[in-house]
Image (cartoon, helix red, strand yellow):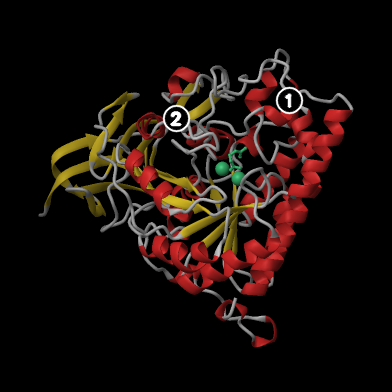
Amino acid sequence: MARYDLVIKNGVVVTPVEQYAADVGVNGETIAAVGHGLRGDQEIDASGLLVMPGGVDSHCHVEQLRADGTTDEESFISASTSAFAGGTTTAITFSTQFKGYPIGPALSGYQQRAARSMMDYSFHQIITDPTDTVINQEIPALIAAGIRSLKVFLTYDPLHVDDRGLLRILAAARRHGALVTLHCENYAAIGWMTEALLAAGLTAPKYHAWSRPVALEREATVRAIALAELVDQPIQIFHVSCAEVAEEIARAQARGVKIWAETCPQYLVLTAADMDRPDFEGAKFMCSPAPRDADAATGLWEQIRRGTIDVISSDHSGYRFEGSRGKRSAGSNAPFRDIPNGVPGLGARLMLLFSEGVTAGRISASDFVRLTAFNPARLFGLTNKGRLAPGADADIVLWDVHKQVTLTNGMMQHAIDYTPYEGRVVTGAPVLTMRRGAVVMRDALLQAEPGSGRFIARGPYDLIKPTGRLANGFNPSAYA
Ligand code: URP
Ligand code: ZN
Ligand code: ZN
């Protein structure tokens, strides 16, 4: 009988469709077998535990360049530590282009910083300035280098792209074979609302949500869908905050548009009321789109169950609360416009989702695996990630479904000085995380070296091919 380098014995293996008692055999960095009675040179007893693929977090901001030339305090080392502590082994982070600047040198900087990663990683390239050079030279070059997803912001200074710019990016992605991901909120309307709110003296963190209500997310989502349909280019809508927006995506999916949707734990467990906490604490919950209300979260769970939402990522953002670059950097009375957006969640994502989803009976363990590992890997072309099957990378998390944990910032093991989930009790937590056959976290203790993570170059894959359905049969991407 074959003997493996390592066997995880006696656990319950969870796939995107079922769960069953089995052993997992690992040779080197790769899963070699899933079966019964496997024997290994080394054996780990997983009795009473779920054996799941390591989490794939397809939306993380790590050591990202800011407009002032500094980078997030969350480094690839601290982010990796947090990821492993939470059961995640792979992340897709972002490289940003700033308007007026080329992509190449900025991307090289990201690659240098990411070389210290311990988790495996890839990049989405943010496009803010679709000049002829960017469209005709830089986008093809970065796709050829394995960065097969682009992100477009329809809001935010200084990142937002107008409709014409978006069309150019969609067409370039179609020509060269990339997925376009989108932040959908209406730029002009948010700017106008913000000015009106500030003029009325409504400056506290909670007015962040008032400045960008659901209608502005819905409008931008519908517009992005329409433009993607015009070009026949597959897209993923990031951080869908509520059912009202998800319903627009479901309508597009029903008419055959290649569109996928992501939401994040903050839209399932936080609400706009959190931004109204006293003493500027509300700033800790500010992200965009803004968390909505309990009904929106209930509606989102329903859309998750219906399959409209494909991915649950963290949208982990590396802003601290204190310090010269933190949320309080403009003072405790800073108007909401001057408070950095985004919340950390890389370490908490899986525990929050397991507890609120699986333990609470809203979704199955297979749904959990599909939403947090299998689908993000499949949709972004991470072919060896997100599944426990022979040939896949041995990225594995052993999960204790009964373990009750009170989340604290210390447990997150990130470089950020708070978690918006402080004090929240969750049931279900990782006890061991393995990346490509190596145990990298056991009982919350890190066992990995900086630089041991690997960049994953993503090749072409069928899922993101256009449908071929074009208005009048004319393909504008061939000419634009
Ligand atoms: O508020 C958020 N989401 N910040 C991170 C950047 C983004 O929009 O994804
Ligand atoms: Zn975004
Ligand atoms: Zn983001």
The numbered mark, 2 or 1, whose residue comes first in the sequence reads 2
Identify the image quadrant of residue 91: top left
- Packing grade of label 1 (10 A; few <14, some 14-19, many >=20) is many
Q: Position of residue 46 (x, y in %)?
A: 29, 36
In what element is the residue under mark 1?
A: loop
Horizontal side of 83 relative to 289 (left or right) equals left
Identify the image quadrant of residue 85: top left
* Amino acid type of the residue tagged 1 in the rendering: Pro
Above or below, 325 against 455 in this view is above
Label disc, if present, on residue 205 of the rendered structure:
1
> Residue placed farthest to the front in the image?
100
**Circle 2 is placed at which residue position?**
74
Disc 2 to disc 1, C-alpha distance: 23 Å
- Packing grade of label 2 (10 A; few <14, some 14-19, many >=20) is many
Residue 16 appears in the rendering = no
Q: Residue at x 10, y 54 (%)?
A: 1
Label disc, if present, on residue 432 of the rendered structure:
none
Q: How many marks?
A: 2
Q: Position of residue 423 (x, y in %)?
A: 57, 18
> Residue placed farthest to the bottom in the image?
473
Horizontal side of 10 relative to 151 (left or right) equals left
* Amino acid type of the residue tagged 2 in the rendering: Glu
Q: Residue at x 36, y 43 (%)?
A: 12
